[in-house]
Amino acid sequence: MRFGLKINPIKNFILIGTVLAFVSSCKESTTTTYRSFLSPMTGLNVPSGNEFDVKVQFGAEQKVDSVVYLIDTVKITSKTDTAGIKLKTAGLKLGNHLLTAKIFGEGKSEDLTSNINVLAAQSPTEYTYKVIKTLPHDTASYVEGLEYHDGFFYESAGDYGHSSLRKVDPSTGKILQKADLDKQYFGEGITVIGNKIIQLTYREKVGFVYDKATFKKLGEFPYTHGRQEGWGLFFDGQKVLNTDGSNTIFFLNKDTYQKTGSIDVYDNKGAIQNLNELEVIDGKIYANVYTTNEILIINAETGAVEGKIDLSGLLPADYFKTEDAKANNVLNGIAYDKATKRLFVAGKKWPHIFQIELVKK
């Protein structure tokens, strides 16, 4: 006796219908694809001045009549076909830029977006240093700002309960004038503007204005841009440069101290964060990179890092005994004497300020 499988005709019909529907959907998926950027991939790094490829996957949902390409909000070009194109980075600021493809067809439009990062075109020149002179420095000063004017150092010492503005004799390290900040304030960067000194605070969102001759406090101003943290300051003769611990250098009005513009700082590999104390020397911006032994030399117009100074070894490696001190009492402070072209560097609670010369590696 043979045993066979009895097939229910109704179930069989349902099964066949399900298979046909699945095959139909698979066939449909091979012809209908969503739209997206094939290139550039999101976050592509492009050296300044270079071109980059732009290619869109258009799919088959609707006919394409034209495509308009924009970088940020500026129209760059338009095409009546779907072929790939090349776009230029010449003239773009360093940093992140939004790329948009605006697709028109059958009375409809659709926007696709990607982005690129424009980096410095070349790797920075590397420098080391030669110590010319070693000057005394108060080890109680947690240096946040340092400038040289009229034969004296002007210094901002930070830390809650220990912050102050100081005028110091370079040869002896003696404090000639001092204005202490209330313990609620953490003093940060300073700069001299004519007969005034301005000083930032760290997280208190306020800056102070002093009379340069008497250190009498003349007023205050709000600090409300960037990350709203005050770090470095420098007056270049026209505008005030300011950092907030990011990779951005802000430009401030010399009278109101409010933001008027900015540049973002990049080398050929990416953004450089933790920009801190500032100086301008021969038209180039010098900036400490917080927690490192490195000073950057930055193009003041573009933000491109043109040089890196390695100041490792200025202090003996075992000078600070605790791990906390080693982590916090780092290089910070750049001052320049224009008359004699002397470059000075300092650190937080360091025993010396060093006069150095740069040596190309």
Image (cartoon, rainbow, N blue to C red):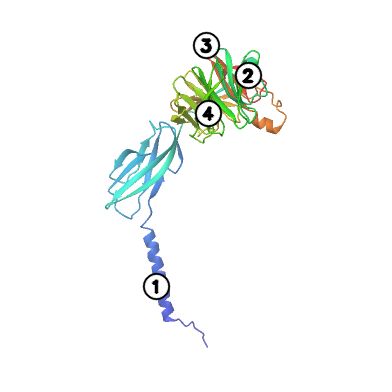
Q: CA distance from mark 1 to mark 4?
A: 76 Å
Label 4: how many residues lie within 10 Å, few (<14), some (14-19) or many (20+)?
A: many
Q: Earlier in the sequence, mark 1 or mark 4?
A: 1
- Residue that label 4 marks: 207
Q: Amino acid at mark 1?
A: Gly
Q: Amino acid at mark 3?
A: Ala
3 or 2: tag closer to the N-terminus: 3
Q: Tell me the quarter of the image containing the C terminus.
A: top right
Q: Is there a contact, CB below 8 Å, between mark 1 and mark 4?
A: no
- Closer to viewer: mark 2 or mark 1: 2
Kind of residue at badge 2: Ile
Pointer 2 residue: 353
Asked if residue 307 can be seen in this view, the reply is no
Q: Upstream in the sequence, badge 2 or badge 4?
A: 4
Residue shown at the point (57%, 12%) measured from the top left: 151
Q: Is residue 99 visible from the viewing direction of this image?
A: yes
**Of the image marks 1 and 3, the number of the one nearer the N terminus:** 1
